[in-house]
Image (cartoon, rainbow, N blue to C red):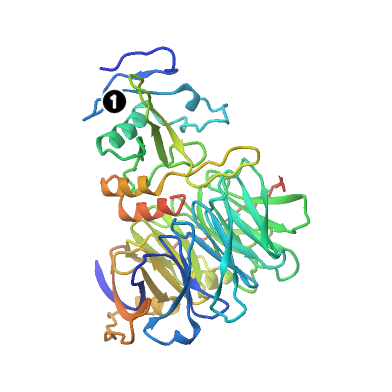
Amino acid sequence: MCVEHSGTVTGPVHPVRTEPDGYCYFFHDKHHTPANTGDAQWRPDLSEADEFQIFSDAARHRVEVGGDLFGVRVLETGEVDVIGTRSERVAKFEKPNSGVPWHGFPYYPIVRNERDRPRKYPVPRKAILKMREAGLITRTQCQRLEKGKRR
Amino acid sequence: MSKKVFAAETHELDDHAISWFGLCPWSRTACFGTEDGHFGIVAKRHQYKARHKVRFHRGAGEPVNGVAFLEDIVMFTSRSAMIAVRRDGTGRDRLNTRHVEIDYGSHGVVGLPAARSFLSAHGHDGLVLAMPREGGVDTKQIIAPEFDFQQVLSLGSPWGPDVIAAACGTRGVVGFRFDRGQKDIPIHVRTGEGSDVAVIAKVGHPDLPYAVVAVDADGTISFLDDVLGGGGVHQITPPYPIGVVYEAIVSSGHLFILTSTHLHCVPDLVKKVLARAESFNGFGFECDASDLLPVGKRSFALIGGSTADVIEFEADRLVRQAAESKATVRGRKRPSGRPVSLIKRVTDIDLTTDTPVWESFHNKIVSSDSTSLVAAV
């Protein structure tokens, strides 16, 4: 079971560890504050259970690129769900320091090049291909995500 | 469920998977983008051969998701970059070896003939105007943070500035005239309450130059007479769920919608709207393609399906064959010729109809609200 941390963990910790690696996860406040426009935001109506399920699936299937994990939520309709407030469909979970739970956030689909801000890169293509290999998404969904398509 | 066989052409490359397919206006031959980011044009002198020689230009390593031509420049886009290449002066299918790379990922790009620029969609980051100049490309960001620009269409510029339509999800369809010198752009928002526009398609009819068809996430089809605010909005609701809406195009006046499960067709949509018809019909085929693109004015291509990288259909012919009671079976013609790159086959494609024919649609004419907003350039 995962327990509450202090210090770097600024948000509630999910009690369940992932399988098979036993990762802990917390819901980072800065990604659950819609007024905060500087950081990616989870869609407000997405439950903590949904967010943890995305992380759990990514961890179980080891959809990992450079130590980070990537995941999606696929609806029964076959749609790769929008999980963020800026139409993001893929979540990135950054590898934490030892002993610190993981956290994640929706990741932008295309390169962002905003004035006066550092350039932001999109979900790595390798991560999308790994999700396909793991069976999290279909071939068609993979092709759509690779092209930065909305649905 | 019934199976029918349709005449089609398939296109595949020897060493690359195709992610975008269309017609090159310079050479009048096929051109395409690949999953590894290359852009190619079929060499003019090979256009009637089964295997076509292709002139390639290397890109940014991500699947090409959009291509637009403007004068002697082609712009191709991906999630990671936009690349502009000038045509080589020595031939209609030759590209300059040098290119300009713009550090914006994009959802797609169009050419604006009057503004002599390219315009691309960047979600909540707005639109980017790319203005070619000698030796480079200048860019300007058009910002309207409340809009999620997922797709842009150029509706042409018959009487002055370019007219643009954009699909903006829950903010509906927006339309505006664009003049390169403008500082502020009045935007017309065409949306019904509760709509979530997934895709839009250019109608391209001379009597309705600024008309577009919008398809909502729930499959509702809205025919907008004029994206700039005039005219009506004709709404057609399919009688059953049509799947996750991917793309839509109007080809030869017929509407085609690609979803996660089907290719749907509403035959003669444009003709019927112009005639103020009160009912529409439609049909759907099982389909596992990931993209739908126009090829010239009369054909379209399905991209990324399991049958072939590209399956090209002539719109009128497909609609005609679908209406025939018996399946049309054609002989297979295997191409011959020396191995080069793009392989074209004249073939027959099995399409399975498992959806009932749409009947007696109600053509509901809804209000045509228009709001003016301002975007800063």
Relative to B308, does residue B200 appear above or below in the rendering? Answer: above
Instruction: Kindly indicate the quadrant of the structure image that contains residue B54.
Output: bottom left
Residue B189 placed where, x, y %? 64, 50
Q: Secondary structure at mark 1?
A: loop
Residue B176 placed where, x, y %? 69, 56
Relative to B39, does residue B336 appear above or below in the rendering? Answer: below
In the displayed orientation, state which residue is furthest to the left. Answer: A20
Q: Nearer the viewer, residue B9 or B322?
A: B9
Instruction: Kindly indicate the quadrant of the structure image that contains residue B90.
Output: bottom right
Q: Nearer the viewer, residue B152 or B77?
A: B77
Q: Which residue is mark 1?
A: A23
Q: Residues within 10 Å of mark 1 (few under 14, many from 20)?
A: some
Amino acid on which disc 1 is placed: Tyr
Residue B218 placed where, x, y %? 44, 50
> With B40 as the anchor, is A57 left or right in this view?
left
Which residue sits at x=39%, y=64%?
B264
Residue A100 at least partly seen: yes
In the displayed orientation, state which residue is furthest to the front. Answer: B97
Residue B254 at least partly seen: no
Q: If the image is split into quadrants, where does the N terminus of chain B sit?
A: bottom left
Which residue sits at x=59%, y=44%?
A113
Which residue sits at x=49%, y=52%?
B79
Which residue sits at x=48%, y=64%?
B58
Q: Nearer the viewer, residue B328 or B343?
A: B343
Residue A15 placed where, x, y %? 29, 19
Query: Subunit of mark 1?
Result: A
Total labels drawn: 1
